Amino acid sequence: MPTEARTAKQNSSTSYAIPPKNLLRPIGKAIMDFNMIRQDDRILLGLSGGKDSLSLLQVLLHLQTYAPVQFKLGVITVDPMSEQFDPSPLKDYLAGLGIPYYYESQPILEQAREHMQGDSYCSWCARMKRGVMYTTARREQYNVLALAQHLDDLAESFLMSAFHGGQLRSMKAHYTISSEDLRVIRPLVYVRERQTADFAKQAALPVIMENCPACFSMPTQRQHMKELLLNEEKTNKQLYKSILTAIKPLISVNSAK
């Protein structure tokens, strides 16, 4: 196993995987640029069991020890109750880390069949999951919700909005929700998807299927954008650097102060 992927158990009683510098640096810069983590914040991380959220978990655990600000950390998994998607193995893993863990089940796939109208399943599901996370954060007195979308996600959202919505929009790096009682942060906004994939593999993180199987049975605009960007990057190695420069004002708009 590469040195970067060693676990902290080698040096302490914890057992998270120590993130490599090429992951810590862009995350640290995003946290600083967008003022994401503040003294005495109580952060609830949305954990799907995919490579991105598991990678972010390791980083936040690491920052709890080494960051100049003190913050509390909890984790939530929203189980959509699909027969083919089972995030329950995360329970044992989180128990081993010894941090607060909230496992909330909701029949999202069944509800989508009954109530979804004029929307993509992925978008509808994401909103439903965020609602569960907001409710849990309020109940357990967390003031920040951390989500694990990365630069690839932001680029895809930007193209989807431009191509299909006629608007220049993307996900925000840091914002306060409309009720003004929770802040949402995305510390991976400067990180490429391949970086979290490499780290998860090197560190042998317990990755489970990170998307509901329904996403694969239903054609998605996002997958089309992912493939478009992949093809373009083959001839333009600076593609994502350019996209980040273009969307920086968009992801900063309405960022929490």
Image (tube, grey):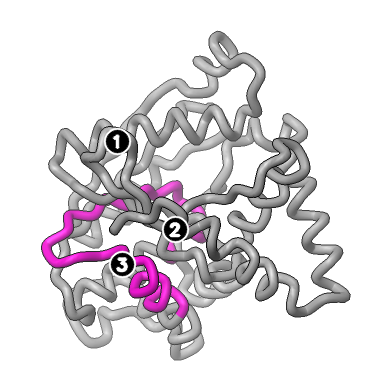
Type of amino acid under label 2 = Ala
Reading the image, the residue beneath label 2 is: 173
Q: In the image shown, does 148 or 50 lie closer to the viewer?
A: 148
Residue at 75%, 37% in the rendered image: 164
Q: Earlier in the sequence, mark 1 or mark 3?
A: 3
Q: Residue at x 44, y 83 (%)?
A: 20
Q: Secondary structure at mark 1?
A: helix
Disc 1 to disc 3, how far (Cα)? 21 Å
Check disc 3 and report the residue beneath it: 35
Amino acid type at image mark 3: Asn
Horizontal and vertical percent position of residue 97: 24, 62
For this rendering, which residue is in front, 10 or 188? 188
Callout 3: SS:
loop
User: Residue 30 is drawn in which quadrant?
Assistant: bottom left
Residue 217 shown in magenta: no
Q: Cβ–Cβ below 8 Å for labels 1 and 2?
A: no
Magenta range:
26-55
Q: Which residue is mark 1?
A: 134
Q: Are marks 3 and 2 in contact (CB under 8 Å)?
A: no
In the rendered image, the vertical position of residue 42 relative to residue 103, given as above or below: below
x, y percent for residue 127: 47, 31
Residue 164's disc number: none
Of callouts 1 and 2, the N-terminal one: 1
